Each structure stands twice: as C-alpha cells, then as structure tokens.
Image: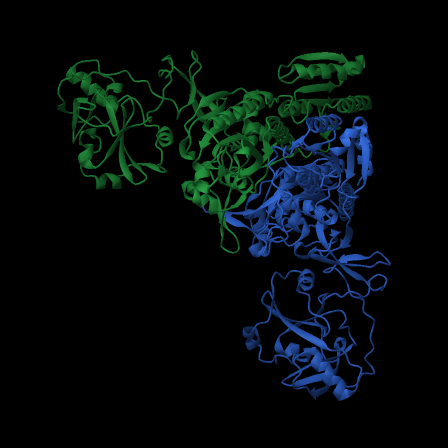
Chain colours: A green, B blue
C-alpha cells in the first residue's frame, strides 16, 4: 500500500520550465520523473511502479506469444558493430567509449548484432527454427535534440525482439506473430494507435510497419485515408501520378524574369506576362544537396518543399544529406543560384532526382541557368533527364491516397512500436547459418521488433490526461484506488485505513492519503494530478455512514455505504478502461 | 512452463576455457550465461529467470522494510561526482565518456551523489525524515581484472539503498533496519554468510559491515574467531599488542651484516653472532612507499609483509599507494637500500607509519642506514619515532582475536552485501540540509547499503553446486520441478504433460523435458547440470502406474503413483531448502 504520509513524493504546483509537452509537464509535476541531464531521467516511486506495470504487460504478452526472454549488456564491444558497418553508420547518435585498456565499446542503441551472434553460438540446424527472442533492456542513443521528457530520451527502456527463420515465408509468419502480440499489448495498455506502413531505411530489409499513438504533440507525422484505411508514416507515403502526354507542348522558351526571388513572385510574373492560370504547382524547384559526397539536385513542384526526412528514408545507402552551401555553389560554376534548371544538369555533373510528379511528359516552368532568366514549356524527358525518381516532396493534407485516391488527412503521433522484416543482412554479415533438410548451409532470415517501454509511459499519459492532471488506465496506474481521508476526526482515518486494507486484501492496490493536517483541497488536487482511476473520499459523508467514490476520468460520483464500498469498487474497476 | 523442446538452451559438455571458478564453469555449461567481453555477460532464458527470482526476493524484503524504490539512469553527468571528488578518485575504475557536444558523463558505479541530490530536490524538513530509498539497477566498474564470470564483472546488477536521517542515532537505527532486512534477504536466498566488520575506506564514514558468503574460491579473505564469534574482513582486523617496558634494553648497537639480503639470512647472522633465540618477528622491515606524493615508510615485523589492501583501507584520504622505485630511491640519498632503519627517517624527510606491534618500548633489529650495517636494541620511542600507527601488516592464521585473544582462523568468501554508515560526507559536499524543529538548517546524515544481485546468482551457485552440476534453492531455481519424459511411448509424454500442467495449475513452476528422440541419459545429465530442485522421471515405472521423484540435492528417490505425484511434490517442496 502506498502511503502519502511517507511516500517519497512532492507534487509541484508549477510547470517545469523545460517541459514542452503535457506528458512531460504532468509526469514531473505529479512526481513520477525528474530530469538528470538532457534526455536522461530518474524515476520516483510512482514512476517506477507505472513503468513496471507497463513492462510486465509487455513481458506477459511476449511470453504468451512464445517468445523467450534473454538479457544483453548495454556495454558492448565494437567488433560486431564494425562488421555490419553500424559502428560508423550510426554517426554521432552512438555513445562510444573506451575501457582502461583503450578497447572500443559502445552503449547499445539496439541489439541486432548481438542477437545474431547469440543464436549463431547456440543453434546450427533448421530444426532449431523458428525462434523468437526478446529482452527488456536499457538502451542509449545520443540524440541530437533529446526532447519531450521521456518521449525522446538518450537513456530509455525498450523491449526488443528478434525472430529467426529459415525461409522468407517463415519470416512473414514470425512477423505476423509479433504484429498480433503488439496489437494485444497496446490494446491491454488501452492505447489508441494506428498501424502504418514505414520505410525500412537505414536498417536494410523489406516490410516494415510502425505502431503510432496519435496525439497532438507527437513528433511523427503520418497519413491516413479515412475511406480505405490506408495509413503510412510520411516517409512511406507514395505519390499517385497521372500519365502525361507532352506531344502538344510548345518548344522550350526562355524569358526574362528579373526580381523573382520566390515562387510567388515568379508566378505573378508568369500570369502578368503570359496570361492567367499559372500557379506554384506548375513551376519546378531545383533543390541542390550533397548526398554523402555526391552533388544531387532534387526536383519538386514549386508549391512543395523537399522533405529531407522523406528523402533520407528513401535514398538507400546514403548516410548524410546536407543542403548546398556557398562553398558548394562556388565549385559548380554552371549553377546560377536562383535560376537553376535541370536542363544543364549532366553538363554540370549533377545527378538529378525527382519527385514522381515530375513524370515523363510533364511540362514545367523552371530556371534557365542564366541570371534573370527562366524557361517555360520545359518538358521532363524531352528537355531534361531524370536520373532517379524518389519520394522526397513534402506531403500535404489532401494529397491523394495511393490506394483509392481519396484526399488523405495528416495527423501527428508518437511511435510506440516498430516491426520490421530485416531479412538476411545481419545474418549474412555475421555468418549466422544453419544446415537445412539436405545438410546444406543456409543463411537465416531475421525480423526485428521494438516497443518503447519507457516512452509508453509518456504516450499513455499524452492520450489520457485532462486539464487537471494525469488519468491512467486501470492496468497501468501506480495504484487502482486512491483513498483520500479528509477532515480531522480519527473515525475518518480509521475508516480510510479499513477500506484500504480491505481493498488490498481483495488484491486491489491502494494509495492512501493518510496525511494529517493537509487540507482536503490539497489532497483532491494531488489525487487529480496523480491520476489513479478510482478516488474514494472518506470525509463529510461519513456522518451518514457513506463514502464518495469518484471515477477520475469521467468525473462520475457515487455515494456508497462504507460497508459496501469495497464490493462497489471491485465491480466498478472492470468497467473502466 | 519451460519446454526443453523449444527452450533457447544448449548445454555444453566441456568447461569453458576461461572459467576459473565452479559457478562460472557451471553457469556457462548449463546455459545460464554467455560471455560478451571481459566482465560483460549476457543472460540466456534460464539465467534471466534465476536473476529475476533473486531480484524479486531482494525487492520484496526492501519493500517489507519500508524502503521505497526509485530508479536512476546509469548514464550520469560528471558534475555531482566532481563536487565530491569521486570523478577523479575512482581513477581508471570509472567508465567515462563524452556526448556529441563534448560534455563529460560517467557510467554510474554507485549512486551516493545522485540520491543525495534527489532528496535535496524534494525534501526540506526534519519531518520528512527518516527516509530510505533503493533501486535495483545496472552498474558499471572498469575493473582492472574482471574475473570469475559474473562474480566480478564490469556491468552488473546491484541493489543499492540510501538512508537519510537528521541525527546520528537515527542513522544507527536506519543502519540496523537495513542490517535486519539483509539478514532476511540472505536467509530467504538460503545463503550461508558471516557479517563481518569492515573498514569504511575511500567512502568516508564510520561503521561498516560486510555480508560475506564463505566459499573456497571467494576473493575476499576474512578472519573469524570460533570462540567469541568475532568476524572481520582482513582490512578491518585489528592487532592486539601487549605493553612493553624498554627500561632494561641495552643501548642501540650497530653491527656489520654483509650478505644479508633477506630476513632469513639476517636472522641466521644474528643467531651466529649473538647466540640463538632470534627469529624474523624480532626484526623490523622498513617498506618504502609513495602515498599520493608523500614518501612514507611502513614498519612491520620482519616475518610479515605489508598488506597494501589493508594499508589502503586504513589510510584515510590517500588515493594511490605505490612501492618505491629506483627513481624514488635516487631522490632520497639518505636511504641505503637493504639497510634502511627508521632512526634517520626525520632527517630523510620520511613520514613513519608503523604496525601496532611496533609499540613504544618494543625493541628491534633493523637497518642502520649504512651499507652492510644493521643495528640491534633499536627501541621504538627511544631510538626512533612513529608518526602514525596503522593496521598494515599481513594477517596470519592464528593471530590473536582482538576481542578474546583466541587464535583466529582465516577463510575465503564472496562479498554479497555491504552496509555502511556514510555520515555527512555527501550531504555536506552537495548541500543536503533540512530545517530542524527549531527552524535551523541541519546537514542530513546518510547510510549506504548494497547487495550484489547478479553476483548473488554466482554466490548461490558456489555454495550449492556439486560434482554433477548446479543445485538451486527452491525459491531461486528457474523452475521448481523438472519433469523428464524418458522413452518413446506416447503415454510417457502424455503423463509428463499432465503432471506438468497439474503442477503449474497448483502454482508450482515446471520445466518439462519434452524432447523426442533424446536419450534418457542425456536428459538426466541435463537435469542434473541445470539444477532444478525436484526431478520427476516419467518412464519405466509408468508400467506400474508410478513416477520417480528425485530430490536433486540429496539424491533421495521415491516412487509415487502418478495420481498422487502432484500432492507429493507440493508436500515435498516446503521441506527443501
């Protein structure tokens, strides 16, 4: 039983200065977490219990699915990560350190390499597969911008699983088993979520989906088609392009365009010069970038920006993308800043990537590669060549669903899970093979699956708080019932103690506010802030032999006789989500 | 239920090449742990369960004692550790790293600083005290010689508690509460242990005791008086010295002593020159050391070495002790190597520390500070001055108990717990004060208490293994019952499944060996190696409607009817330790 009189807890009246999102604000104010350093938090008693409740639900669902728990260290030698290339690929996101002998170590951001080697160490036959292992473990990522409290931290708790199969079909089955276990887990955590298509990105591999918990302050953006149910994170959203016939388009025409530093001013000039009907979507932006050390230009319609996250996710094998700086422009004298068009790209040694909208036959207004000059009737495939198509243009609300062409909506969310068909990348690199039915050596195919356990504390808070505080689902809350003794009479405290003891005897966890000399107002405010689902007020009503039972989330109140309070609560709890 | 047919487990026939101690050897062979790097291990499924069982017992006893669980990160900014000096004091034992911005971090070896700051952040009044907080958390120490598997690792799980009190008496009470909780914990873990006096050492503070689990391969040495029960680790053992009267001792006499490079040759010369009766204990060794940057000489009887660990533990405020090298001798030209005596120490600028045996009035044979010359009748306090007495001489079996003077025995053990009255060192350094009853600011006094949770897995194994494998206590074992199906008949497997399901329904955890095509011999060997306390053999006896129930540790066997097997086991388990 948690006792407010001795609990290591001081709620705060004021929001912490660095809190950007409600979960962060409330978890600090209600005494669940405290900041130690950027992206590094400690957990106070209420936080420890809540985190463990979530952890236990995750573990239980993994065990029920037949996955086996193991546990790796966080401190890992670099060897295996060097073999797969991730020692370098991770860049500054990886915490690296040396031991007293100068040997290189890292703090594990995720454990694909280690699991691959573990299975390699124990198993050798197809008969040993399929296998799925998991761990619930502390992970480290040196985020460039740790933020939103425990949503994007640098030390955090994750459940990571890995599946091992002989065949591609086996991998799909293992993937679907994890998908089902994740659905059960998040349902039990009472989270709202969408399962969205994701791009596999730097991890390599094929199919990949994310579990996204919609919330206003989420830092992930995703696309949802309310008609057909298509859902994708922004990186994975694809573009539907209608075919174009350019046979009727007039020849490329260069025209003077002084004082058109923006798309808007260019459109104004176009409409003044050639008659109305032009808009930004008919112009072509040439965004110059360095992709690792290769100069590329990315073509997008003038009414859209290049989304660097989308570009990065869809440009396989490129680790670092940066915008052209003056020094880069100086190296390519053929590029006239503000007037670049793709017509001279080959001459200038630039690789051209284009959004699918720049399909062959489409016609554009773009720079003419000369100061104060633009060109119109610039036709893709006729007047310039696209080297590679890539999904890189910014997604907008109302873009066409790639499945049914209905305008999509865009929403924000927190990523709470990710499931991923890795394939044979890690097994290949680290030599994880088994003998098949014919005694032939086969590379194992793998899946990788993650749930952000500490992040889930914040994601659940984001989805369930209200203006007065936190409001936990029953299975997650640090206690199921908060018994508040108000007043000064011993009878009040005795009744509160009795009800609390009886509830605990029924297996219902209790936090009792047994503080003497604290005002009822303060106690109620604390109870609302802390967010335990059922609040029992022992006070005024006791004269009539009653207590008041409040449901934190709905605000519903019932006056119930002391003698039947425990039964009432035992009946109430299963009805709450 | 654990199923051998799918369990991620491959037992090994051979001992791992790097295993020095039985627990390491058996935990690897039985598939509990695997080595990742020096002192860094991963846990396979059986290991995870065993570790968690221990963790849960520790947590349960802490909770019952009223201590509150919190959780700190392992990745800690250096600030607080710099304030207390431990950022430097820890030397190469500390894992240090920098984040992407170049800020300094460490991987927490223990969390005194962080707990002090946490309490400072929340509490401000004497009314808030006493308080005791704990965490079960992963810790890091870059040991010079990680060894014995998980006994001395570089990443390990510890339970660390901290108590906070206003008064010294309060600290003693908190200390005793922890002591009692530790006794309950280790009793529940079925460990044999001694509670021994320890020296507070580098931690600062006053009283301190260690819980030592005796075992042959333990790396801690302790002293035990079988008569009065006195127990101390070697660092804390004190020396009983009889008073001496030097009034009758003749004047100091220098004599020629060529060719006496060792105490033995010196004693031989003494007996030849001055008649028999001399032995090594009558000579005086001058061991030259650098204590941080101060030259010191440590005087011990010639038949004992200086125990550097004892010296270090008893020299408050000294971080680094090293033996004089030739370069050091070169700086002190008054020191004649091989012929040093304390007579000229002051002249030479050397601070003299001495073992208590070199009490005032005792008379010695020692160097005469001249080549090939020694001196006899060199009296402490008359012919030389001791600046400080220090317990630094090697302890020997048979030394006098400091309480009752009975000869002590010396034994080896693994340190499994440490309780410690820290005092106000950390609160002073970090400004943890509360207002007392009179509104006056008072520095809080602290205790610090640790249990090696992952180490306990090995310590329990060390105390309970036998020649055929591990042999766990009931509450610690990865399952309580190991049901082994031997033979090929479906009836065997069906009965094994039925008994297993019935046991689990009774809340008794089971591992079933349901492997088809594995020989009974292999199954028995595995069961013995894995060490689950009760083994049920379903096989030959089934023809008579019986199963065989074996107690792993005692080897006791009973043939029991299938129908009463579950009841039999339920009755048997509480009788086992």
- The residue at the point 53 percent across, 50 percent down is B96
Picture quadrant of residue A466: top right
Q: Quadrant of the C terminus of chain A?
A: top right
Residue A217 in view (yes/no): no
Q: Which residue occupies the foreground of this view, A475 or A480? A: A475
Q: Is residue A167 above or below residue B201?
A: above
Tell me if B574 is positioned left or right of A445 in this view.
right
- The residue at the point 79 percent across, 41 percent down is B577
Q: Which residue occupies the foreground of this view, A106 or A92? A: A106
- The residue at the point 62 percent across, 77 percent down is B348
- The residue at the point 80 percent across, 14 percent down is A545
Q: Which residue occupies the foreground of this view, B344 or A447? A: A447
Q: Which residue occupies the foreground of this view, A86 or A514? A: A86
Q: Is residue A530 above or below residue B276?
A: above
Q: Quadrant of the N terminus of chain A?
A: top right
Give the number of marks.
0
Name the spot of residue A540 as percent of width and height, x first.
Answer: 76, 16
Residue A359 in view (yes/no): yes
Tell me if A37 is positioned left or right of B403 in this view.
left
Picture quadrant of residue A177: top right
Q: Is residue A121 above or below residue B389?
A: above
Q: Is residue A39 above or below residue A531?
A: below
Tell me if A518 is positioned left or right of B145 in this view.
right
Name the spot of residue B261 as percent of width and height, x first.
Answer: 65, 80
Name the spot of residue B409 as percent of width and height, x first.
Answer: 80, 61
Name the spot of residue B326 as percent of width and height, x first.
Answer: 56, 74
């Amino acid at each position: 039983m948690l006792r407010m009189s001795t609990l290591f807890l001081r709620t705060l009246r004021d929001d912490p200065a660095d809190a950007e999102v409600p979960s962060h604000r409330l978890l600090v104010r209600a005494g669940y977490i405290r900041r130690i350093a950027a992206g590094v938090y400690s957990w106070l008693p209420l936080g420890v219990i809540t985190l463990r409740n979530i952890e236990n639900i995750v573990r239980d669902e993994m065990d029920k699915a037949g996955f086996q728990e193991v546990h790796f260290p966080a401190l890992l030698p670099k060897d295996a990560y060097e073999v797969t290339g991730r020692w370098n690929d991770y860049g500054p996101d990886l915490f690296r350190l040396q031991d007293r002998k100068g040997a290189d170590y890292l703090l594990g951001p995720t454990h694909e390499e280690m699991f691959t080697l573990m299975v390699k160490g124990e198993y050798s036959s197809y008969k040993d597969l399929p296998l799925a292992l998991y761990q619930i473990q502390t992970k480290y990522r040196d985020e460039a911008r740790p933020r939103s409290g425990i949503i994007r931290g640098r030390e955090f708790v994750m459940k990571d699983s890995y599946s091992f199969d002989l065949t591609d079909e086996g991998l799909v089955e293992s993937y679907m088993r994890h998908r089902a276990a994740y659905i059960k887990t998040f349902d039990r955590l009472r989270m709202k979520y969408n399962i969205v298509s994701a791009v596999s990105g730097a991890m390599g591999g094929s199919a990949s989906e994310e579990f996204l918990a919609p919330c206003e302050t989420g830092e992930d953006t995703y696309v949802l088609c309310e008609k057909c149910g298509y859902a994708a994170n922004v990186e994975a959203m694809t573009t539907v392009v209608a075919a174009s016939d350019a046979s009727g388009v007039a020849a490329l025409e260069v025209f003077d365009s002084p004082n058109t530093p923006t798309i808007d001013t260019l459109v104004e000039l176009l409409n003044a010069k050639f008659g109305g009907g032009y808009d930004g979507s008919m112009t072509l932006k040439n965004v110059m970038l360095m992709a690792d050390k290769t100069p590329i230009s990315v073509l997008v319609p003038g009414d859209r920006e290049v989304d660097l996250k989308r570009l990065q996710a869809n440009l396989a094998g490129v680790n670092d993308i940066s915008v052209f700086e003056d020094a880069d422009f100086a190296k390519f004298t053929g590029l006239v800043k503000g007037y670049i068009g793709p017509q001279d790209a080959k001459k200038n040694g630039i690789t051209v990537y284009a959004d699918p909208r720049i399909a062959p036959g489409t016609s554009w207004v773009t720079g003419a590669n000369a100061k104060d000059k633009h060109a119109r009737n610039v036709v893709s495939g006729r007047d310039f060549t696209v080297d590679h198509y890539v999904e890189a243009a910014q997604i907008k609300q109302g873009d066409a669903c790639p499945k049914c062409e209905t305008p999509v909506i865009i929403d924000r969310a927190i990523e709470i899970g990710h499931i991923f068909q890795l394939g044979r990348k890690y097994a290949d690199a680290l030599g994880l093979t088994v003998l098949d039915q014919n005694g032939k050596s086969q590379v194992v195919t793998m899946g990788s699956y993650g749930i952000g356990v500490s992040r889930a504390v914040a994601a659940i808070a984001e989805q369930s708080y209200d203006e007065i505080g936190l409001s936990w689902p029953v299975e997650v809350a640090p206690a199921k019932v908060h018994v508040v003794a108000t007043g000064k009479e011993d009878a009040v405290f005795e009744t509160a103690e009795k009800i609390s003891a009886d509830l605990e005897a029924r297996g219902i966890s209790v936090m009792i506010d047994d503080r003497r000399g604290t005002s009822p107002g303060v106690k109620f405010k604390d109870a609302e802030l802390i967010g335990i689902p059922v609040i029992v007020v022992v006070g005024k009503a006791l004269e009539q032999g009653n207590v008041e039972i409040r449901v934190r989330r709905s605000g519903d109140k019932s006056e119930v006789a002391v003698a039947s309070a425990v039964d009432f609560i035992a009946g109430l709890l299963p009805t709450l989500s």
